[in-house]
Image (spheres, rainbow, N blue to C red):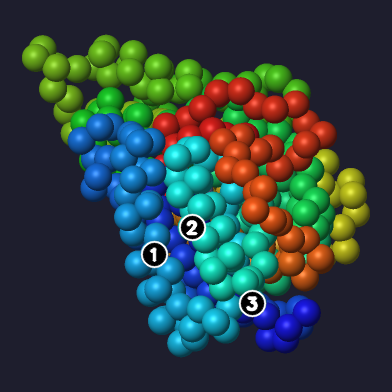
Amino acid sequence: MPTPLSILGIESSCDDSAAAVVRFSGSSAAMLSNVVHGQSKLHADFGGVVPEIAARAHAEVLDHCILQAIKEAQTDLASIDAIAVTAGPGLIGGVMSGVMMAKGLAVGLGKPLIGVNHLAGHALTPKLTDDLAFPYLMLLVSGGHCQFLVVHGADQFERLGGTIDDAPGEAFDKTARILGLPQPGGPSVEAMAKDGDAKRFRLPRPLLDRAGMDMSFSGLKTAVLRTRDQIALPGGDLRQGDVADLCAGFQAAVTDVLAEKTRRALQVYLDLAPATPALAVAGGVAANGAIRAALSSLAADHGVAFTAPPLALCTDNAAMIAYAGGLLFQAGHQDDMTLQARPRWPLDTSQAAMLGSGKKGPKA
Ligand code: KG4
Ligand code: ZN
């Protein structure tokens, strides 16, 4: 195993084309570059990610991202020791763009190839940023993902539960659309909610009455839609104060559901008697102040450390793929040219596969 070990990571599973270099020296790892080329402008007119447009855009810019990542890392392609690429889950055309690019580089440069699960990349990020000890509890909460994972090791994940329909970020985005607020919905709903009365509209807390850690958020957006129709002025306009109250009510409902389900997940996790217990949260929704505060105080109540990686590493990026790939490579894992792009790839294969596909791709 070369030391230091330099891994090039490639990510293209949704609407971000990304490349990064992570260098391992023994058990420690440093991010040398992290280039993300977002596509949101290309999809803005369509109200969601258009898979075919995404795939073509990845194919067009990935080589530029890779060269920039190599340059920013002040290295060269010949000095890279292995190539890690997201091989799923995600939008199949985009994943294929990345996998084909990685295969071409691996053959051309004569370097090892490692296929990485995108969700493993997210789930292992707190280890890269905070060097958390296994096992830790992870809440992955974004526009396309929502699940609780006990992370036992680089290739060992236990899924405790997750959404059975929409992801919370998707619900924030749909709520913003219903209320005429700009996308992405999370930040605009959060900003409006600051001035709102969360108690005025009592929105449902789906699945709280059911045991376990599964969640549902699609009914919540229907409740927002129904409430909006009740309070709209003749002509359809909404008063600013009403929008603020509805945003606050919606955010409180999401926060309550996430907090209660996290409380249950913490109980299951703490039964494992981890030596240094930690709760980590990742994904775009982790940027929400109310949600973050609720999770952080819950962790404090249970005597568990709380960590959230910086936003640039919470949202889709290739540093997490390079890091996860490096851990797998150090453990002796390697792929060959039969590596396939997988639209669905559950992290915990002992669990039944989740059905349903969010705006940002399969939830797995
Ligand atoms: O992780 P991410 O960048 O992309 C994936 O979904 O993979 O997450 C984006 C999602 C969007 O749905 C966005 O509305 C949501 O995260 N988001 C937020 C906030 N900032 C971003 N949701 C709630 N509050 C926020 N402050
Ligand atoms: Zn993601």
SS category of the residue bearing label 3: loop
Report x, y in % for residue 328: 74, 62
Choose the circle earlier in sequence order: 3 or 1.
1
Q: CA distance from mark 3 to mark 1?
A: 18 Å
67 lies left or right of 253 = left
Q: Is there any visible trace of residue 73 in the rendered image?
A: yes
Choose the circle earlier in sequence order: 1 or 2.
1
Choose the circle earlier in sequence order: 2 or 3.
3
Check the image and name the residue furthest to the left.
Answer: 235
On residue 81, which mark appears? 3
- On the image, which quarter does residue 136 sit in? bottom right
Residue bearing mark 1: 63
Residue bearing mark 2: 101
Residue 141, above or below 165: below
Residue 184, above or below 356: below
61 lies left or right of 266 = left
From the image, which quarter does the C terminus lie in? top right
